[in-house]
Image (cartoon, rainbow, N blue to C red):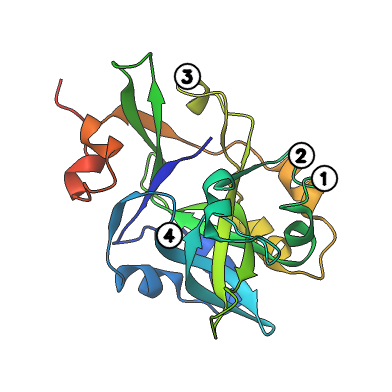
Amino acid sequence: MCGRYAIYGPVTIDRDMQRALDSLHVDLEAEIDQREPRYNVAPTMKVPVLAIHDGKATVEAMRWGLVPSWAEDLKFGAKTINARADTVQTKPSFRTALKKRRCLVPASGYFEWKGESPHKQPYFIKHPKDHLLMFAGLWEGWKAPDAEEWLHTFTIITGEPGKVSGDIHDRQPVILQPDAWDAWINAESDDAAKLLATAPGADLMYYAVSKAVGSPKHQGAELVQALSQ
């Protein structure tokens, strides 16, 4: 499960990432750097997501917690912040989005907890060189009966953990490499399931952070700093 993550500037993007973004005609670095930094993204918050709209790749603030168009209310999103890679093709909440509305969720890193309550220790998991991570995601549109505009919501797909993150938790977000970004968000592509199944392990590291991250009201940069030994 991925229940908290962070996205903030300045963004670190390598050459392969830049080439992939250029092909999508998206200045993701500028999009993130000009937005308010989020050091403790929690469900229901609106954060930048990269998706295709009207044939064009765009960055849009979406609400975390996918709500299908047929859901009665926004409370539905509380149970759909994550989608399992092994069941996403069959779950009614996700199967249509997997075919038509895939997205990329940029992140500076994410949090997981280890241990037993009340002594669980949070850890921040990120790229060793602070490179931006791209989580595989899905998005949907939902509109209240009395609303004029659609609300866009998203979920993060999780899969088996890598060698590093497996020390902390039994699942991790599916992190897509730059050569898969275009195919993933392109609704015309039928390789979505294959991209999830063949996503290579990401280069990650982790360290213990403040337990203050447990509350969404805490949003300071200190939340992603390693605890002093």
Are the residues flagged by discs 1 and 2 in contact, CB closer than 8 Å? Answer: yes
Looking at marks 2 and 3 on the same chain, the residue that comes earlier in the sequence is marked by 2
- Give me the residue at 44% from left, 50% from top: 43
| 4 or 2: mark nearer the eye | 2
Q: Amino acid at mark 3?
A: Asp
Front-most of 41 and 167?
A: 41
Q: Circle 1 sits in a helix, a strand or a loop, which is it?
A: loop
- Residue placed most toward the observer, 194 or 99: 99
Residue indicated by mark 3: 167
Displayed quadrant of residue 170: top right
- Image side of residue 137 versus residue 132, left or right: right
Q: Amino acid at mark 1?
A: Thr
Q: Residue at x 57, y 78 (%)?
A: 150
Residue 49 % position (x, y): 51, 65
Q: Which residue is mark 1?
A: 90
Q: Amino acid at mark 2?
A: Thr
